[in-house]
Image (cartoon, rainbow, N blue to C red):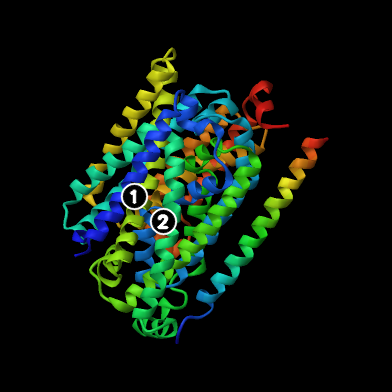
Amino acid sequence: MIADSGLFIVIAGLYFTMVVGISVWSALHTRTEDDFLAAGRSIGPWVGGGVLAATQISAGTFVGTLGRHYLTGVSWIWIWFGVWAGWLVSAVLVAPKLRRFGALTVADYVGKRFASEGARTLAAALIIVTYTIYLTAQFQAIGEIASAVFGVAPLVAMTALLASTAFYTGVGGVRSSSYVEFAQTIMMVTALLFAVPVVIAHAGGLTALGQYVGSIEPRMTGWWFGWRELVAFGMAFGLSIAAAPYEMTRYYSMRDVATVRYAIGIALVAQALIGSCVMILGIGMRGLFPYLPSPDQASSILAAVVMSPLMGSLFLVAMVSAIMSSVNSILLVTGGAFAHDLYKRLLNPGASQRCLIWVNRIAIVVLGAVPFWFASLKLSDVQAIVVEQAKFIASFFFVPVVLGLNWRRGTKEGAIASMVAGFLGCLLWRFTLQRDFAAHGIDAVEVGVALSAMMFVLVSRATPPAPEANLRIFFD
Amino acid sequence: MGFGASFYGFFVAAALWLVSYFLWAAAAARRDRRRSRR
């Protein structure tokens, strides 16, 4: 078994040594909350691009997306254009203004733009709730990998994941996570690029693979999903990426606006490589193992059975690092939302820098443990959970971020109404009319964003504008 | 039947998207530099 092999232990040992080394080095450079949450605004385009890619690429990609391609074939790949449209909106309409503002958390933006502590608190609370759902997917994925490859109980794997990730997140903050995530992106791309020729060779070549999976189910090589479904899924990801708190906080840590734009481009290249490889691997696994009990197991079995011990070990470590990078980014956002936006503002306004760093660290561990219970329930497959959280983020946050940064007339009442309407609209549609999607073709994310936009405009029009001093920060 | 337009078309579209993005990013950087010199 690959998990017992000396090679895996050596590669995993090297990886964790690197993580610990970077964490300790970063901790020595972290003295203030600004260092902890924004790396002293020192991150360049290559590291920044690696960070944005690693943050986006998660268990959802290695386990969920690979499983989705295993099950449905090629057409899921087209939702990447929804993701990239979201990045484009972010690069054009969001990132430049946010980077010039240069705050520490995303709720900072909400509080300052709309001159409202209420809006800031609501944003922080909704981010914590939604990202707890996202963390559930990551923990569920590590549970799948642990039981399929290592024969370890999911709870043990989840605890190990939280302990190791909370360590490097809590010790070095954004600085350590940035350099670790850059290395993780290189590992992920390398492992996937090496894996593709191995799987294609096992399947007898690309043409033979296409012919075989096409014979199992013709839609595998054509269009399993119709354009309406692809647009709905793509929109969910795109709208959530355009205003994703875990990406937005990373813009704050980069040197300047041009750095952010190039970093997004480098992240797109990494995502294109990773997305393409994951598609081919998913379809390749269907060709090699047509009837796995769960599509989420395809990636683990690929690493454990199909690949050589060296390649399999590298692939497994890359999978774990994909999960770690997303857990890390989510914990930085939720920990920061609690410490900076709730604790410092509501509970202890006079807190020292040292105290805030420690509250960040404790929040990271506590908020990281909450999703254990949800993950143990296995409410859905990994990819479905990732899609659902994306829909909620888009529903309550896309409008206050994208419209709020580009429409001066938006007010605090409009922002609060927009977040509440978007969240509740998405929630209600998801648990009622969503099940008839095939009949009406309207997804919960479309309802959430439409309601959010409508409330933002109507309520803002009826209430006094934000103070000029606050608007001047975001509008020339 | 092997892979078709849904497979190969993705690679072509993705390459075009990436090239267009970097051309825009370079133009935006030039525009920012011109503005900061004024």
Identify the disc placed on residue A187. Answer: 2
Query: At numbered mark 1, what does the secondary structure look like: helix, strand or loop?
Result: helix
- In the displayed structure, does residue A59 sit left or right of residue A185? left
What chain does mark 1 sit on? A
Query: Do callouts 2 and 1 point to residues on the same chain?
Result: yes
Where residue B9 sits in the image (x, y, percent)?
Answer: 56, 74
Extreme-top residue of the structure: A350
Identify the disc placed on residue A466. Answer: none
Q: Is residue A255 above or below residue A304?
A: above
* Visible residue check, residue A48: yes
For image coordinates 74% across by 41% down, the residue present is: B32
Question: Pointer 2 and pointer 1: residues touching (CB < 8 Å)?
Answer: yes
* Visible residue check, residue A128: no
Label 2, label 1: how far apart the Cα atoms are:
10 Å
The residue identified by callout 1 is A15
**Residue A21 vs residue A352, the one in the foreground:** A21
User: What amino acid does circle 1 point to?
Assistant: Tyr
- In the displayed structure, does residue A333 sit left or right of residue A13? right
What chain does mark 2 sit on? A
Extreme-right residue of the structure: B38
Q: Which comes sooner in the sequence, label 2 or label 1?
A: 1
**Residue A209 vs residue A412, the one in the foreground:** A209
Quarter of the image that includes the N terminus of chain A: bottom left
Quarter of the image that includes the C terminus of chain A: top right
Q: Residues within 10 Å of mark 2 (few under 14, many from 20)?
A: many
- In the displayed structure, does residue A339 sit left or right of residue A300? right
For image coordinates 38% across by 55% down, the residue present is: A60
Where residue A6 sits in the image (x, y, percent)?
Answer: 22, 59
**Residue A337 vs residue A230, the one in the foreground:** A337
User: What amino acid does circle 2 point to?
Assistant: Met
